[in-house]
Image (cartoon, helix red, strand yellow):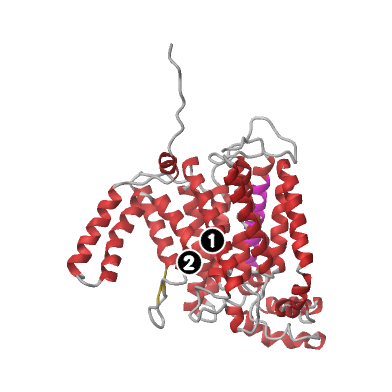
């Protein structure tokens, strides 16, 4: 008789299933090295640059998905070092601008030669097209049209391109799993950088090595590669769901301990950002996990208890921190926020259709501020340059024709997430674990977008939000039998 033996695939084979590698990429790199050595003998920097050009171009065509994920995973760091200043009046060359356009052109080329098919257009796509069209008059009427055009490309067009790429490139389990690990790696190195900055007070991403907040006379503000503790915390908290699943699904005790240690690092770095919105995003993510996954509730209670214990033991440090003394001082009153809203309403009434144009908020705020100056008790409401609220910014600078599709887009995101979690839709290439990780990242980015203007302000946060949205808005199937209103999704966990 014959005995059937199921052989466990090697690590290299499993890695190739997640990130397929074409050996001919090495041939392209060798050709580039020969060209570089022939034309730039002795200058090894130029030789390396020329060697990478054919390698990158060939890699984009042969392994578009891999290059897309490499860009998503490396752009927070590379954006600080790779930027070509083209001079006055000419847009600078950045990693995000080049990568998004090259990947988009390659994808369209693959569609033209019928090497790839596009997903059908859904209402979400048309709403995003409407937002893009309505942003055009904001750019042309902007405070500085060239600067406004660059900001709109970085903050709006690039995230929309990422949505389109994610929707059409990450279409199978073979591509979804590397995306999970890419998100995990990004959140991990953000947490490690925050950990390092807290203890060394040294930044790798500033010219002087000092943290940006140190240069302003404030302390205890880690920033990572984003020069902002808020963006660092927003990106980092999105990985909590991923590492919780890794802790529970690890094959051995070492993997569980490692995942738990990473969660502890995430917790401490979240605390060290000293940002209330980041703290709320952290606890909201944990509560979300506990509500949806019953097996996570006991360890989540332990982690929440540890978090509150750390907060209580360090409360005297918090009270003495210059950051919290500034945040808790009488400079952020409800009355001041109310004045900002009233002044924004005055601006909206004077520009009722198309808004002020991109970048005019600070100028017109100072102009119309005198209408409510007699109600101001602190200095916070004076000299506002940003609305610090996505709705107000879109309304004032873009008018109602931009605000309506913007709100519709946010509502459609919430509806799609609710349908996936409730089992009313089944994702074609993501199991329950993948959907939960995506929703965890989405929840953090979405919550920040509602409380600040980050959805169209912090470029990488917007890229992550629309990356996840593009995956979630793929063609989903409806279950044959209806599910209860709040029933959890019945998709099996993928290990």
Taking depth in this image into account, of 300 and 150 the one nearest to the observer is: 300
Q: Residues within 10 Å of mark 2 (few under 14, many from 20)?
A: some
Tell me the residue that label 2 is attached to: 77
Q: Residue at x 68, y 70 (%)?
A: 389
Residue 308 in sight in this render:
yes
Locate residue 42: give its quadrant.
bottom left
Q: Residue at x 51, y 50 (%)?
A: 179
Q: Secondary structure at mark 1?
A: helix
Residue 191 sits above or below residue 147 on the image: above
Mark 2 or mark 1: whose residue is earlier in sequence: 2
Q: Is residue 174 magenta?
A: no
Residue projecting furthest to the front: 254
Q: Which mark is residue 223?
A: none
Which image quadrant: the C terminus? Answer: top right
Residue 361 sits above or below residue 431 on the image: below
Q: Position of residue 324 (x, y in %)?
A: 74, 76
Tell me the residue that label 1 is attached to: 189
Q: Is residue 407 magenta?
A: yes
- Alpha carbon distance from label 2 to label 1: 10 Å
Which image quadrant: the N terminus? Answer: top left
Residue projecting furthest to the top: 1
Q: Residue at x 67, y 52 (%)?
A: 414
Q: Which residues are magenta?
A: 399-418
User: Do callouts 2 and 1 mark residues in contact (Cβ within 8 Å)?
Assistant: yes
Locate residue 266: give its quadrant.
bottom right
């Amino acid at each position: 008789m014959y005995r059937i033996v199921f052989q466990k695939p090697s690590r290299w084979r499993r890695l190739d299933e997640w990130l397929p590698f074409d050996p001919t990429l090495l041939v392209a790199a060798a050709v580039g090295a020969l060209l570089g050595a022939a034309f730039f003998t002795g200058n090894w920097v130029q030789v390396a640059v020329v060697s990478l050009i054919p390698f990158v171009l060939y890699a984009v065509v042969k392994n578009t998905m891999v290059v897309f994920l490499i860009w998503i995973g490396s752009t927070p760091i590379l954006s600080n070092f790779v930027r070509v200043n083209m001079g006055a009046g000419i847009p600078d060359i950045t990693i995000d601008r080049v990568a998004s356009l090259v990947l988009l052109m390659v994808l369209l080329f693959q569609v033209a030669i019928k090497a790839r098919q596009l997903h059908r257009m859904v209402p979400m796509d048309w709403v995003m097209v409407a937002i893009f069209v309505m942003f055009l008059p904001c750019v042309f009427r902007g405070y500085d049209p060239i600067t406004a055009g660059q900001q709109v490309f970085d903050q709006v067009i690039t995230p929309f391109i990422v949505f389109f790429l994610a929707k059409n490139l990450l279409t199978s389990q073979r591509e979804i799993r590397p995306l999970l690990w890419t998100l995990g790696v990004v959140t991990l190195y953000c947490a490690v950088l925050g950990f390092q900055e807290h203890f060394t007070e040294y930044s790798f991403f500033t010219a002087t090595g000092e943290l940006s907040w140190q240069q302003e006379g404030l302390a205890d503000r880690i920033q990572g590669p984003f020069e902002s503790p808020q963006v660092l915390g927003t990106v980092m908290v999105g990985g909590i769901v991923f590492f919780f699943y890794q802790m529970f699904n690890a094959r051995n005790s070492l993997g569980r301990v490692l995942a738990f240690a990473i969660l502890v690092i995430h917790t401490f770095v979240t605390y060290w950002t000293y940002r209330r919105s980041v703290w709320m995003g952290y606890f909201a993510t944990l509560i979300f996990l506990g509500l949806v996954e019953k097996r996570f509730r006991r360890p989540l209670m332990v982690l929440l208890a540890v978090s509150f214990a750390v907060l209580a033991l360090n409360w005297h440090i918090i009270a003495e921190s210059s950051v919290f003394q500034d945040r808790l001082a009488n400079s952020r009153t409800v009355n001041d926020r109310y004045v900002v809203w009233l002044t924004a309403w005055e601006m909206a009434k004077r520009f009722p259709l198309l808004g002020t144009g991109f970048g005019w908020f600070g100028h017109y705020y100072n102009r119309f501020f005198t209408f409510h100056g007699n109600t101001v008790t602190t200095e916070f409401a004076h000299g506002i340059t940003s609305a610090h609220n996505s709705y107000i910014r879109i309304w004032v600078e873009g008018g109602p024709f931009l605000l309506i599709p913007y709100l519709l887009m946010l509502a459609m995101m919430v509806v799609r997430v609710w349908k996936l979690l409730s089992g009313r839709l089944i994702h074609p290439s993501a199991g329950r674990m993948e959907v939960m990780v995506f929703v965890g990242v989405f929840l953090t980015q979405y919550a920040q977008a509602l409380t600040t203007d980050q959805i169209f302000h912090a470029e990488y946060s917007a890229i992550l939000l629309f990356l996840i949205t593009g995956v979630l808005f793929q063609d989903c199937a409806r279950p044959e039998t209806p599910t209860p209103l709040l029933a959890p999704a019945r998709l099996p966990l993928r290990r």
